[in-house]
Amino acid sequence: MSLLDKPFSEDLPLSGVKVLDISQGVAGPYAAKLLGGMGADVISVEPPIHGDYARLTPPFFEDDPHLEKSGLFLYLNTDKRSITLDLSSAQAQSVMKPLIEWADIIIENYAPDTLENLGLSYKDIEKISRKTTLVSITEFGQSGPYKDYQGTNLISLALGGLLQITGDVDKEPLKVGGRPAEYIAGLSAFSGAMIALYAQRASGEGQHVDVSMVEAIATAQMYSGLNYAYLGENRVRANDIAPMYQVSNGHVGVMYRQGNWDDFCDMIGRPEMKDDERFIDNVARRENIIELNQIVSEWMIKQDKTELYHLAQGQRMPFGYICDAEDLISSEQYIHRGYFVEIDHPVCGKLLYPGHSFFWDGEKLPMERAPLLGEHNESIYEALGFSKEELSALTEKGVI
Amino acid sequence: MSKTALEGLRVLDLTQVWAGPTCTKILGDLGAEIIKIESGRRMDISRGGTTANSGAGLYPDGDPGDEPWNTSGLYTDRNRSKISACLDLTHPKGVEVLKKLVEKSDVVIESFRSGVMERFGLSYENLKLIRKDIIMVSLASQGGSGPERSYGSFGATLEQTAGIASFTGYLGGDPRTSGTFLPDPMVAFLAIGIVLSAIEQRRTTGKGTYVDLSQREVTTGVVGEMVMDYTMNGRKWAPNGNRDNVFAPQGVYKCFGDDSWVAISIRTDDEWDTFSEMLNLSLEQSHTFSTVEQRFARHDELDRLITQWCHGKDAHDVMHALQKAGIPAGVSLTGEQILADEHLNDREFWEEVDHPMVGRRPFLSRPFKFSKHPASTRSHAPLLGAHTEYVLRSIAGLSDEEITELSDLGITSNDPTAFGPTAF
C-alpha cells in the first residue's frame, strides 16, 4: 500500500489498479472515469489555475461559466482525485517520477511529440517504471502522414468515413450529435488500457497503447469501407436503416423485419398489404420505401409516441421513439434500473447524472462526484514528501 | 513479442448481430480463443438468412452464392478470429454440451433477449454451479430488469431511445439517426474493458461475476453533457447541423466532384485570422468576425463565404492547405476513399483476409494499437459450424458416439436450409 493510494477504498472490480490521468477534454477523461467507476484509484493531474479545459466548456450550471460548474467536466470526472501541476515546469519531473512509479496506467491526449518534450514519452516512462502502460489518445494516432494534423470531433467523423453516410443524399454530409468521436475513442482507450493490464499481469511489463479517434470512428461506422470492398460501390446517405415517422407528439422509428411484417400490417389497419408485391420482403420494401412511407405516415401521425412504442414492442417489433433529455429522465425503464444517479457537489448541489450502464453482480457500483480543482493537492503532495511550506511556495510560483 | 496480449483466455460467445460479435472479434484478434455458438436452426442474423432477399446480407460483388449465410459481409467482418460450433440450445442435449463448454471457459458473453438464457437453463446461477468462477456478461438491449427488459432493439433504434437522435439532424430539421448502428460498436468497445475488468477482479479475489449491461444505457452514457444541461438548466438540445456548441465557424462544404465535401473547424481567434487570409477577406471584413460571438451570430454568412471559396477546389487540396496552416480540416471520405486513404494505409488500418468463399478483401482492424503485442486478424470468419467437431471433441471432451448422436438428432447441424427458410 502506497501513501499515494486513496484511503478507505472499497472492494470493487478494479480495486488496487492505479491510474494517472494527465489528459483533458473528453476522450481521455472519459476512459479514466470508466476505470475509476470500476474501482481503480484515479489521480487526475490538471494544469494550475484553469485546470482541465473541460472546466471551461459549456454547459454550465445555471449558465454561469465557472471552473466548478461545467456539466461536461462534472460528468466526465467522477471517481477521481485532482491535483494541479504545470507539466512544463522545472519541478514537474520530480513530482511525476513517483506518480509514474505508482501508476499501472497513464492516460494522456497531448499531440504526438509533446510528451517527449516534457520528458514523459513512453521511453521515459519505461525507464522509470517497467510495469506502467501509457495510453495515448490523439485524432490521428502516433504515426502516419497526418500525425501532426489538427483535428476535432467533426474532422474525425469526416476522415473516419461516418460523416459521408449520415444525412440526406441531396444535402451535405451530417455529423452525429454530441462528441461521438471523442467518446468512442474514450471507450476504446478504456478497453485498450484493460487489454494492456491483462498482458502486464502475465509479463510484468507495460506498453504504449495508441488510440486514434479517426480509427475509432472508422472501426465503429463499419459500413462504408465494407460496402465498397464487397460491392465496389460507395454507400450513399439515406434514412432507410430505420425510418422515422412523425407521430402526434414526436417521432417513432421502425425497423422493418420480415418476421414482423404481417403483424405490422395488421397494427396499422392495412392487412391487405401483407401480400402486396411492392412490400413483400426487405429488398422490395427498400426499393419502394417512398410509397411505403406515405402509407405508414398517414397512420403514424395520429399515434402517441410512448403508447405506440410499448404497443409495438409488446408484439416483438423493435421500434424506437425519439427521446430527448426529459423523456430519458422520465423513462420508467431508466427509473426502474436507477440509471440516473443523484450526486451532491459542493458548488452545484444535488444533480442527476447518467450513472453506470450495468449492474455488477446484482449491484450498482458507487459513483463519487468530480473533484474540485486541486482538491487533493495537500494530501497527495504530502504523500509525495512535500512539506506544507514547499507546497505553498510551488503554488505561489504557479507550478501547482 | 511472440505472445499475444490475451493468450490463455477462452470466451464462449453466444452473441449475434453487431455489438457482441465486435467485442469478441477484437478479443480474438488479441489472442483470446473465441468459441462462437450458433445453430442451423438459429444462426446469427447478420449471416443474412438462407435467402439473399432477406435484405440483411451484404454479398461479395452482390452474389450470395450457394451458401449466402457464409458470405455475408456483415457476418464475415464481425466474426473473424473465432471458431464456430453449431449447437441447438432449444434441445436439452444441446444445453448439456454447452454446460461442458462453460466448465472449460473463462467468460460467457450473450446478447439474447433478456430471459432467454434462463429459459435455456443457462442463467448465471446455473452456470455458477458448473464453474464457480465463471464470468457472465449479458449485453441486453434494456438490461435484465425493468418494465422494458424484454424489449428488442437495433443500433438505429437505440440512437432514438437513448437520446442521440433527438439532437442529430440538419439545423432546424427533424431528428436523424447516424446511417449506421453506432450504439453497437460503442457497446462493443466498452464490453471489452468490462470483460477484462471482471477477469482482473477474478485474478485478485478468485471470484467470478455477472454483468447485466443495458445497451441503451451505454448509449446515453456518450451524451452525458446533453443530459447534464437538462438536469442543470432544464434545457433540451435540438439538431444543430454540423455546427459546434463552443467554436465557430464549423461546417461541411462542397468541393469539386460528385458528392465531394470537406469538413472545417475554426477553434480559435488565431485560426480565424489565418483562415480569413486564406479566404482573401479584407482586413476590414475579417475584423467583423474576430470574436467567436460575432462568428456564431453570422454563421450563415460565413458558411456562404467558405462555400464560395471551396467551390471548384479539390477536397484533398483544401484539407492539406488548411492543415499546413494549422487549421483542422478533413475530407468527408467515401468508402472508396477510406480504403485508399494514405494515412490509414500507412498505419496498416485495413487487414486483408483470404476467405474461401469471399476471396481476399480488406477488413477493419481496431481502434487501438499495442506496442508490445501487435494484434491481427488470426483467421477468417468461420463457415457455419466449421469447428463443431473440434469443439465437441477437444474442448467439451465428447466421445465419437456422443458426437454421432448429436449429429443424428440434428443438434449440431450446420445446414440452415434443413430448418426451412429463415429471414431477418
Image (cartoon, helix red, strand yellow):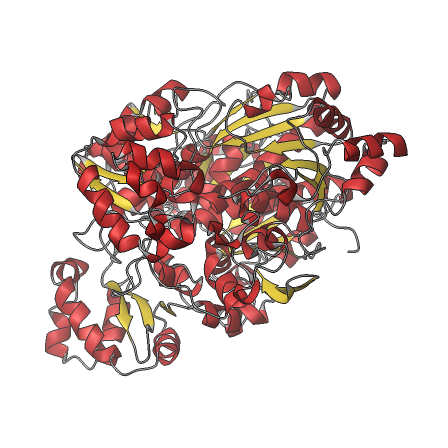
- Left or right position of B344 against B324: right
Residue at x 51%, y 59% (from the top left corner): A215
Residue at x 56%, y 26% (from the top left corner): B211
- Left or right position of B310 against A206: left
- Specify the quadrant that holds the N terminus of chain B: bottom right
Q: Where is residue A313 drawn, in percent x and y? A: 37, 29
Judging depth in this view, the residue of B410 and B181 nearest the camera is B410
Residue B9's image quarter?
top right
Q: Is residue A345 above or below residue A252?
A: above
Q: Residue furthest right?
A: B400
Q: Where is residue B92 drawn, in percent x and y? A: 70, 22
Mark count: 0
Judging depth in this view, the residue of B247 and A306 nearest the camera is A306
Q: Where is residue B334 drawn, in percent x and y? A: 42, 68
Q: Where is residue B372 drawn, in percent x and y? A: 71, 55
Residue at x 88%, y 31% (from the top left corner): B401
Q: Is residue B102 above or below residue A189?
A: above
Residue B289's image quarter?
bottom left
Judging depth in this view, the residue of A165 and B194 nearest the camera is A165
Residue B262 seen in render: yes
Residue at x 43%, y 29% (from the top left corner): B142
Residue A70 seen in render: no
Q: Is residue A347 above or below residue A99?
A: above
